[in-house]
Structure formats: C-alpha cells, structure tokens
Amino acid sequence: MSAVRVGVLALQGDVREHLRMLADSGAEPSTVRRADELETVEALVVPGGESTTIDKLSRAFDLREPIRGRIAAGMPVLGTCAGMIMLADRIEGGIAGQQTFGGLDVTVRRNAFGRQVDSFEADLRVEGLDAPMRAAFIRAPWVERYGPDVEVLASVDRGEAGVHPVVVRQGPLLAASFHPEVGRDDRLHRRFVGMCREALR
Ligand code: GLN
C-alpha cells in the first residue's frame, strides 16, 4: 500500500516538526501553502502557532474555502494547539472577526490556562495509548463545550477551574491542545496516520 500523502499547512507555526513526525509515522508529508498543493494531499495537519495569524494568512492565500470544502468532503485533519482552534466550530476569547475552518462541533477557549500557567508540561493519559504522553501545553486552548458526536480522548483536571478535554476526535478530525510534534513520542501522529488509512480505504 502506498504511503498516505499528508500535507502540513505551512503558513505559520511549527511545520518542520510535523513533517518529520509524519515521515517517521509512515506517511508521505509535504507542505501546503497554495490551493493546488492542497489538491495533491489526502489529509492535512494544521500546526500550532498563532490561530489569528493562520486565519488571516489562510484567507489571504485563498486557502480557507478550499480547506473548508475538503473538510466537508471528509478529509482527515489533525489540528494541534492553534490547529485545534482552527478546527473548532466556535471560539471563546478570539479576536474580533477571527474565523476558523471549523468541522469539529466544539467550543474552544483560547489561552485557556491563563497567564500564570502560560506553558507547562504534563503526563497525559490518552484513551487508546497504553502509557501516558508527555504533553507540552504552550498558551494552549481547551475544549469548553462539545457536541454529541465528539469523542473525548484526554482531559486535564484544573482543580477548581474544572476538567477540560484536550484531545478530541470527531470522525476523521483529530485535535490536541498540546504539541505532540515536539519531542520523540510519535504515537498521536501514528494514530492519525492510521485514521487516514481507515478513512481513505
Ligand atoms: N494561543 C495560540 C492561539 O490562540 C495557540 C498557541 C499555540 O499554538 N502554541 O492561536
């Protein structure tokens, strides 16, 4: 079977790390900056970075509508951190006029963990993985509310601030609040590549 062609949206953010991890996970990665590049891939990763910038650039590069169209047509997408925000149907704490690609029936809260705990790491238990993942959260969002078709694969317990999903899946869409592309643990990428194989069979 030929390797799944997975694009990494390369407008802004940590693109290189995703390319490497996708290659390690048995996919055939490439960068996507233009609509014709999007047409050559079977699946997409939307990286971490800054969702307001990714939003603006995707509109400036005429990628927003093509990406929305592909998501509607069932393209598998992995979104990490800012990428999770880009996949969310609704945002809290967005800037005026901020848009997303959407597809995931969730409301995400941007910069949810607050200023004092801007960035932190945690050992995160993810459903379906036998051992926890060391997860780096960097000005990360969390899922505030989600619809009935959304499967929660991991949550963090913030004490009085509540328990919030940080890894969710809805059909071929997978999103994580943290950065699975940093470090060496490629289990979430492998899982995504497996999801792609299933969806594209
Ligand atoms: N806070 C960023 C945003 O709103 C996300 C941070 C990240 O991707 N590390 O887009």
Image (tube, helix red, strand yellow):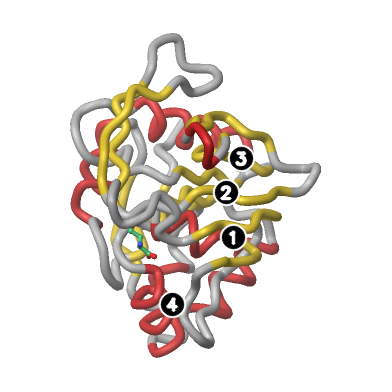
Q: Nearer the viewer, mark 1 or mark 2?
A: 2
Q: Residue at x 50, y 80 (%)?
A: 98
Q: Residue at x 67, y 43 (%)?
A: 170
Task: Identify the disc placed on residue 55.
Answer: 4
Q: Are marks 2 and 4 in contact (CB under 8 Å)?
A: no
Q: Is residue 175 above or below residue 129?
A: below
- Badge 3 marks a residue whose secondary structure is strand
Q: Are marks 1 and 3 in contact (CB under 8 Å)?
A: no
Q: Nearer the viewer, mark 2 or mark 4?
A: 2
- Badge 2 marks a residue whose secondary structure is strand
Q: Residue at x 68, y 42 (%)?
A: 171
**Mark 2 surroundings within 10 Å by alpha-carbon count, few (fewer than 14), some (14 through 19), many (20 or more):** many
State the separation of the CA atoms marked 2 and 4.
19 Å
Answer left or right for 189 relative to 118: right
Q: Quick check: can you spot residue 196? A: no
Q: Which residue is mark 1?
A: 88
Which of the two discs, 2 and 4, labels the residue nearer the N terminus?
4
Q: Which residue is mark 2?
A: 143
Which of the two discs, 1 and 2, labels the residue nearer the N terminus?
1
Q: Which residue is mark 3?
A: 169
Residue 9: where, in percent of width, then height? 36, 64
State the separation of the CA atoms marked 4 and 3.
21 Å
